[in-house]
Amino acid sequence: MHDQHHDRIRLPALRERITTATEAAALIQDGMTIGMSGFTKSGDAKEVPLAMAERARQSPFRITLMTGASLGNDVDKLLTEAGVLARRLPFQADPVLRAAINRGEVMYVDQHLSETVEMLRTRQLGPIDVAIIEAIAITETGAIIPSTSIGNSASFAILADKVIVEINLNQSLELEGLHDIFIPKHRPQREPMPLMTPHDRVGTTAIHIPPEKIAAIVITERNDSSSTILPPDADTDAIAAHLVNFFNEEVRLGRLTNSLLPLQAGIGTIANAVMTGFIDSPFEHLTMYSEVLQDSTFDLFDAGKLDFASGSSITLSADKGKQVFGELARYKERLVLRPQEVSNHPEIIRRLGIIAINTALEADIYGNVNSTHTLGTHVMNGIGGSGDFARNAYLAVFATKSLAKEGKISSIVPMVSHVDHNEHDVDILVTEVGLADLRGLAPRERATVIIDNCVAEPYRHMLREYVAEAAKRGGHTPHVLEKALSWHTRYRDTGTMLLPRVTLAATI
């Protein structure tokens, strides 16, 4: 039975450790801290978590679960429903888990994605009891070759007491050689990361650990979950056009060249659509230094616009995934996947001069951005890597549609109900209405530029009235404190941010 896995498990002694997911899951006990592979629905463990959930339904136990980012295949959902998750970090995107977090049933630690393994390495978190890592193969020396993501997998495997490897026969062996795994030394002996361009390779192509740490190997043939991004629409096309016009002007002024600087894009429909907008732009020989390589990355490759892309995972829609992984050799020399503490490393981001394009749930008149919470209290997904990039980027761009819920919500408000990215880290705010360049502006100037360029009516008029009243109160950053969150409370109480007797149609 095991002979068929020789090309996947190349160290013969390890073939004896092939077992069932149920037997492997028995290694995980109540109270343990588990590090699991997976970054934005790609490269996640697929069999052992399901066996954990099944066992917990018969014999309850709870764990702390750390990953790279979000998981696919309903893993977070099933673990939540089975009561397995006591604590979760650093990112999630599952509706069932989200609801449990907001009920206070699961303690969620929403972290910058560059920080988790740093805290593990210095024993501020952890220790990791068991790592569960998806791989395409194990080398002759027992090194683990990851699949479609690296995320935190390398450090989880290195730091864990025991490692369970899921060998995924559906993940192509063409992925071998795609990874570049660099592990920083412990402080104070740490050296600089020697990355000077997005295409530099500075590490190894596999995760090197003592093979005796591999306690179990599970064979799987489950696919990654596909991304569910929506196609571009009129609003996202307008956002992309505003950004292309902005970058054209930056080139004209001599601040950028026609190849811009390395691009980073957050996950989701808006960021993906904005990147797709570069296809019809005048820019060429573009590069990416990002976290998630999405459909738009490969659309840009195919359009001849993109020369190279560095990320931590590849997460694609169903159709794009079939196309890309069916001809991976065509892209392989222009791709690299790195650990997320490298892809999101502040020093590298600043050194390379990244143009960071991320999405906002809401922004306020002074440029503060909320990317995680609705009405200030209920978490959606998490900050992810947007903070790593925004704080250190050459340009930090945040994009959002100006309206939500058919105009009942304005994405630009007097004061954000939760702050993830403060005004000091936000350079550009863009909606389908227009673009606000906030560089070098004082708060009062920012308010004018944002309201004039990014806000849809009737909210533009409402914000102008708010600013006029706030200005009478004075201050460097004027506010009417008793009204600063009134838009949110009005939406909570009435279902709309609009004032009574004011409709969207009446002012358009």
Image (cartoon, rainbow, N blue to C red):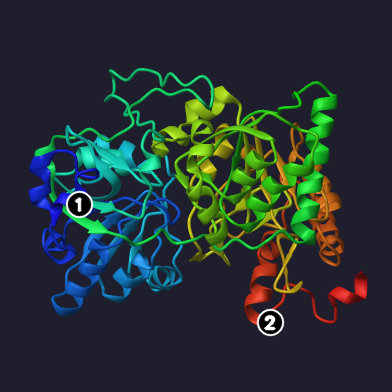
> In the picture shown, does residue 241 fall above or below 339?
below
Residue 418 position in % (x across, y down): 56, 57
Question: Residue 211 lies in what quarter of the image?
Answer: top left
Seen from the viewer's position, the closer of residues 98 and 124 is 98
Q: Who comes first in sequence, dot 2 or dot 1?
A: 1
Mark 1 is on which residue type? Answer: Gln
Circles 2 and 1, Cβ within 8 Å, touching? The answer is no
Identify the secondary structure beneath mark 1: helix
Question: Residue 219 lies in what quarter of the image?
Answer: bottom left
> In the rendered image, which residue does mark 2 sit on?
494
Seen from the viewer's position, the closer of residues 449 and 473 is 449
Q: Is residue 25 left or right of residue 193?
A: left
Identify the secondary structure beneath mark 2: helix
| Mark 2 vs mark 1, CA separation in Å | 63 Å
Q: Residue at x 83, y 64 (%)?
A: 462
Q: Is residue 436 left or right of residue 417?
A: right
Q: Could you tell me which quadrant the C terminus lies in?
A: bottom right
Residue 364 seen by the camera = yes
> In the rendered image, which residue does mark 1 sit on?
4
Q: Residue at x 60, y 61 (%)?
A: 229
